[in-house]
Amino acid sequence: MRIGIVCYPTYGGSGVLATELGKALAGKGHHVHFITYQQPVRLNVFVPNIFYHEVQVPTYPLFDYPPYETALASTLVDVIKNNHLQLLHVHYAIPHASAAYMAKKILEQDGIDIPVITTLHGTDITLVGKDKTYAPVVAFSINQSDAITAVSKNLCDETFRTFNIKKPIEVIHNFVDVERFARKPIDAFKKVIAPNGERVLLHASNFRRIKRVQDVVLIFNEVRKKIPSKLLFVGDGPDRPVAEDLGRRLGICDDIRFVGKQEQMEDILAIADLFLLTSDYESFGLAALEAMAAGVPVVTTNAGGLPEVIEEGVTGYMANIGDVDTLAAKAISILTDDETLQQFKQGASAHARKFDIHNIVPLYEALYERFLEKAVV
């Protein structure tokens, strides 16, 4: 198959999933063309079957805001024509689904019918999509897609509640490359972080308000009172100063380390004992799944699609949003002794295999096959 993938190239879950999906498809012999404004961060190795097309957005004094959607649609037309693509898979509704619709209508003038599959990832529906500035275009573009998928049942249900969607939405869960995350910890690295054998707690996100990073600090503060521990923050964003300030006020900043954005999460997760996720909402919880794939149990809120990922009492625990006391108590119960911690580590690793890339990618391939007969190239 010759597949075009449109995504955001950043660290967000939608870009990560799209890139890993493209790499997996290329590994199975398909030709995959990424079309976006810069090379995706996870596209960091050479793969013969992967092609990258940069969307150029010229700046003109006439435009206060460069028209990326128009430039993207034009680039899609060019790439589809010149590379004889058979199918377009766009990730995150805004503005990718609308740009794909525009490209599809342009190509119809030349007798080319390119099927468009739109995958919904979360905030494109629950946050940005609800904004009345964008909502009509989001709903229209989704309805014009040939097929729609969502990364969790929760997101599927939320989409139907938010918009008048007239087509079925298939749930294809996010996935993880379990083999990639099955790493042994680097002892020297762990000794730097926890020189006296302390437990290592980890949080990774974009530090937006929805992630409630202050709750992570509060949970760690309670755990630290009972169990010698260190806290690693991975990522960056607007609420990082909030977490830093709270750590200083609680007098625990010496036990907290911010390591910024990291591409090789598998090496960091390998030294972690517990992953904390305190979000107001997660459409799926890819960060939690990656932690489990590395054998790291998760203590999280029960928000959004997380109950579809976490197996209560096996891979970790859940509690209500903002219930710091319960989340801290659950964390302490996992970390108290080595035997309990090991049981949760094994449970996390085993459960993550249900979402292994080798189980999920064939679902996308089967979806593509249903529409290939529509393509005229």
Image: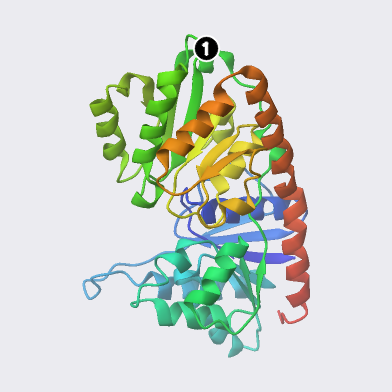
Query: On the rendered structure, is 340 left or right of 36?
Result: right
Q: Position of residue 277 (x, y in %)?
A: 48, 42
Q: Position of residue 35 (x, y in %)?
A: 53, 62
Q: The N terminus lies in which quarter of the figure? A: bottom right
Query: On the rendered structure, is 193 left or right of 353?
Result: left
Above or below, 138 relative to 321: below
Judge whether residue 258 can be spotted in this image.
no
Q: Which residue is mark 1?
A: 197
Q: The C terminus lies in which quarter of the figure? A: bottom right
In percent of the image, x 77 and y 58: which residue is there? 362
Judge whether residue 216 can be spotted in this image.
yes
- Which residue is nearer to you in this view: 62 or 122? 122
- Which residue is nearer to you in this view: 206 or 61? 206
Q: Quadrant of residue 62?
A: bottom left
Mark 1 is on which residue type? Gly
In percent of the image, x 56 and y 20: which residue is there? 336
Q: Position of residue 3 (x, y in %)?
A: 67, 65
Q: How is the image coloured?
A: rainbow
Q: Position of residue 300 (x, y in %)?
A: 51, 43
Query: On the rendered structure, is 127 left or right of 287?
Result: left
Label 1 crowd (10 A; few <14 / some 14-19 / many >=20) = few
Q: Element under label 1? A: loop
In percent of the image, x 40 and y 20: which residue is there? 225
In percent of the image, x 39 and y 67: which residue is there? 128
Q: Quadrant of residue 160?
A: bottom right
Above or below, 144 relative to 129: below
